[in-house]
Image: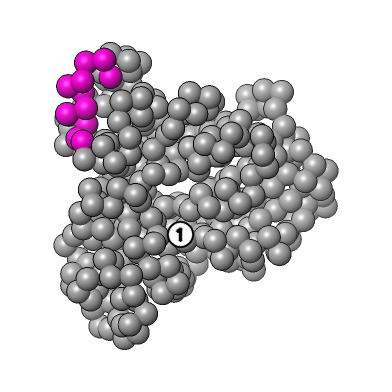
């Protein structure tokens, strides 16, 4: 018999769960080769749509069918509304546009007509995005100074913010929440100081990248997302979305061979729920699909460069590129952890 936590986690896979990571596509934008062929995790589409807009030949994968339905919805909705319009439009209102509704595949249409999605904004349908905005609206005024994140200088002018009792209490509460609700099979891979690492990353991001200039912080902290539509531009497909190949699979699925050789693989934070040495069999499986000199980007919520095992022969940890792209990465939590180059 499943525990209540296991049941909760199982149900989560039936929902649209992008928003955990808020990954910065600026990293991929700086590394993708002109006209290259890229492979990435679909999630909410940020990385996928950014690469496609650059003219990349993109294959995206996701093990959650709900994410595939999200892509189908966005791809067709983008033919009717831009990101600004979509952020102000609920899914219920969008479905009142008959030609949009009729353009959706039947399974996708049926999925999105469930009552739980009815009042979600078209541009930000993810369950985690919804939770983040709820937390921001009710908790942020308690732990953040007035004007945050609307005042771009607030993090610099209030150095005492991150040492305040309310701020530390918020992170302590998050630690309790993880201990109580996070599934045991995932929690066992978290380091004991996970919350400290997350807190340190978030504070560093707030100090270095004020929210008025950081779409990822704005998504997490904006109390009124409709006034921050610029923050969702990367999440909204352009016409290039028609050219994206989306598969319901993992990054190592054999069907991905498809005669393709990739110049870039963006692996998201797929190893955060696995021991660090899971990276090694992944590299072994993926190397037959990489061009010599091809790049693998690995993100993590809590792992730094020294937390990973030594790479096998034929792979190079590109520390210079990692240092350069780390300066571009505005993600508040899920940041690039490794830049690995395949030597062939």
Q: Is residue 221 above or below residue 94?
A: below
Please give the name of the residue rendered at 67% of the width and 39% of the height, measured from the top-left corner.
34
Report the number of numbered marks: 1
Task: For mark 1, give the secondary structure.
Answer: loop
The quarter of the displayed image where residue 97 is located: top left
90 horizontally vs 271: left or right:
left
Residue 240 visible in the current orientation: yes
**How far across and how far down the image is residue 238, in percent?**
44, 32
**How far across and how far down the image is residue 249, in percent?**
53, 30
39 horizontally vs 185: left or right:
right
Q: Which residue is mark 1?
A: 331
Quarter the C terminus occupies: top right
76 horizontally vs 286: left or right:
left
Q: Is residue 90 magenta?
A: yes
Please give the name of the residue rendered at 21% of the width and 58% of the height, measured from the top-left corner.
223
Q: Name the colouring of the figure.
A: one colour
Please give the name of the residue rendered at 69% of the width and 47% of the height, measured from the top-left corner.
295
The stretch of residues the image draws in magenta is: 89-100
Neighbour tally class for label 1: few under 14, some 14-19, many 20 plus, Cα within 10 Å = many
Please give the name of the residue rendered at 33% of the width and 18% of the height, measured from the top-left corner.
104
Q: Nearer the viewer, residue 261 or 280?
A: 261
Q: Is residue 189 above or below residue 344?
A: below
Q: Nearer the viewer, residue 304 or 154?
A: 154
Magenta highlight: main SS: helix
């Amino acid at each position: 018999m499943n525990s209540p936590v296991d049941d909760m986690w199982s149900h989560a896979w039936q929902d649209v769960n992008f928003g955990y990571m808020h990954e910065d596509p600026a990293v991929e934008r700086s590394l993708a080769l002109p006209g290259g062929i890229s492979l990435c995790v679909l999630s909410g589409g940020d990385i996928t749509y950014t690469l496609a807009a650059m003219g990349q030949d993109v294959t995206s994968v996701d093990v959650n069918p709900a994410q595939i339905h999200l892509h189908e919805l966005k791809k067709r909705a983008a033919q009717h509304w831009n990101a600004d319009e979509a952020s102000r439009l609920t899914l219920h209102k969008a479905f009142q546009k008959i030609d949009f509704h009729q353009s959706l595949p039947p399974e996708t249409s049926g999925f999105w007509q469930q009552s739980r999605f009815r009042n979600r904004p078209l541009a930000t349908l993810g369950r985690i995005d919804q939770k983040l905005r709820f937390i921001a609206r009710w908790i942020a005024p308690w732990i953040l100074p007035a004007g945050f994140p609307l005042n771009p200088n607030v993090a610099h002018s209030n150095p005492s913010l991150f040492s305040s009792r309310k701020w530390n209490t918020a992170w302590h509460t998050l630690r309790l929440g993880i201990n109580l609700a996070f599934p045991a099979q995932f929690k066992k891979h978290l380091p004991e100081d996970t919350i400290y690492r997350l807190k340190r990353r978030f504070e560093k991001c707030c100090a270095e990248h004020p929210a008025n200039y950081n779409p990822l912080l704005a998504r997490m902290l904006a109390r009124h997302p409709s006034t921050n539509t610029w923050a969702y531009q990367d999440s909204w497909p352009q016409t290039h979305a028609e050219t994206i190949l989306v598969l319901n699979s993992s990054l190592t699925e054999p069907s991905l061979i498809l005669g393709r050789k990739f110049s870039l693989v963006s692996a998201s934070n797929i190893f955060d729920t696995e021991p660090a040495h899971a990276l090694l069999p992944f590299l072994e499986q993926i190397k037959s699909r990489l061009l010599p000199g091809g790049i693998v980007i690995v993100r993590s919520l809590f792992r730094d460069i020294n937390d990973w095992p030594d790479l096998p022969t034929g792979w190079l940890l590109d520390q210079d590129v990692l240092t350069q792209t780390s300066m571009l990465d505005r993600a508040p939590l899920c940041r690039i952890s490794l830049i690995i180059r395949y030597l062939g």
